[in-house]
Image (tube, coloured by chain):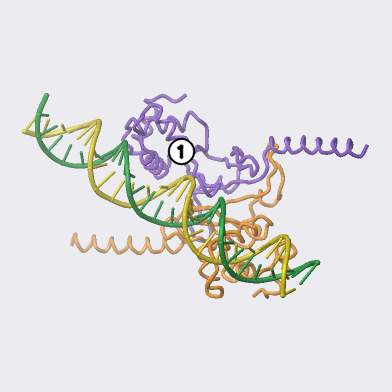
Chain colours: A orange, B purple, C yellow, D green
DNA sequence: TTTAATTTTGTAATGATTACAATTGAGCAT
DNA sequence: ATGCTCAATTGTAATCATTACAAAATTAAA
């Protein structure tokens, strides 16, 4: 639980004026774990600031990204997701349920931060995985067993 | 230079009927290097098939992705990009010029294909980098030198 | 309190992608 | 050939996240 004062200090450090909407957006990012959609954040701050607009959310998020407070995660091709910058982890998208999970791995590339490859200056390293999550695997397993039981009953 | 017959064989192998538009889309992907936009492909096949529709391009690309012939690359948050599946390489997006470059690296994670992490079944591994490309770095370097020269002239 | 600068708001536009119904085309039996 | 059936393609309209932009509100300074 980060305090309002702590958030304000963080924003000022990065040259961002800590207005109420901005502080709230940071707080929502901080309180709700990772990979939040702009829409989720918008609805969340609407509870406090009924007049808040989507534009403010987008503007604030992009300035947070610009100064390096926040990461923009692009996995699905549709909605971008945002989270407070945090090193050494990637994301996993379940192709079945659409859920996004954190994968804490120490990628050797991500360690040697901001180096060069073939003359290009590397500033950001993004990685993500797609597959079937634990829960969906379990669910599929159970369904398979059900079907086998059905088959046996039919053939009897 | 892949032959039409070779493309047809590939599509049939994957259970895709090798219609002319589909073969042409594969050929465009094959002849023009990696990370092509749907729009580029659309314009390219329009040269041969003046009646071709965007929908066909999208449908075809998504079936190619589905059967694993093609990878969908999501970097910019806007346009998706497509390329024929190829292992052990990632992409680099230049934040200045918007160019996308191949980065051939042997990521240790990408080697142990389709394993599991924390119970989740990993089917795809995506990685990309952002930064400033070689050319833009050189350009910035030259501009900096220009400015230094200007400063000297002014102070003289 | 007035002024100026910044931030926020709200609406309209954008642009890639998808939905869907109508048309076309390929393969096959008559 | 002709008609039939199914799949592929087309074209238009809708969707939906995001951006542009001008007006209103807020803040900080004078």
Point out the residue furthest to the right here: B156
Residue drawn at x 67%, y 74% as measured from the top left:
A4
Q: Position of residue A30 (x, y in %)?
A: 61, 69
Q: Quadrant of residue B58?
A: top left
Is A24 on the left-hand or right-hand side of B139?
left
Which of B37 and A56 lies nearest the eye of the viewer?
A: A56
Q: Quadrant of residue B143?
A: top right
- Where is residue D20? Give x, y as percent: 56, 50
Q: Position of residue B91 (x, y in %)?
A: 58, 42
Note whether residue A100 is visible.
yes
Label 1 belongs to which residue? B39
In terms of secondary structure, where does tag 1 sit? helix
A137 and A7: which is toward the camera: A7
Residue B12 is left or right of residue A103, and the answer is left
Question: Residue drawn 69% across and 52% down?
Answer: A111
In the picture, measured across the screen, residue A108 lies left or right of residue B50, that is: right
Q: Chain of mark 1?
A: B
Q: Quadrant of the C terminus of chain B?
A: top right
């Amino acid at each position: 639980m980060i305090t309002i004062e702590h958030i304000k200090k963080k924003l000022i450090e990065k040259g961002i004026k800590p207005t109420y909407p901005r502080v709230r957006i940071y707080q929502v990012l901080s309180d709700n774990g990772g990979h939040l959609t702009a829409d989720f954040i918008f609805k969340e701050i609407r509870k406090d600031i009924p007049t808040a607009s989507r534009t403010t959310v987008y503007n604030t998020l992009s300035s947070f990204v610009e100064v390096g407070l926040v990461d923009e995660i692009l996995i699905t091709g549709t909605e971008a997701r945002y989270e407070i910058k945090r090193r050494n982890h990637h994301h996993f998208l379940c192709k079945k349920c659409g859920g996004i999970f954190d994968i804490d791995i120490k990628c050797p590339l991500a360690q040697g931060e901001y180096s060069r490859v073939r003359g290009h200056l590397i500033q950001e390293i993004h990685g993500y995985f797609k597959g079937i999550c634990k829960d969906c695997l379990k669910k599929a397993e159970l369904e398979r067993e059900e079907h086998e039981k059905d088959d046996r009953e039919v053939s009897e």
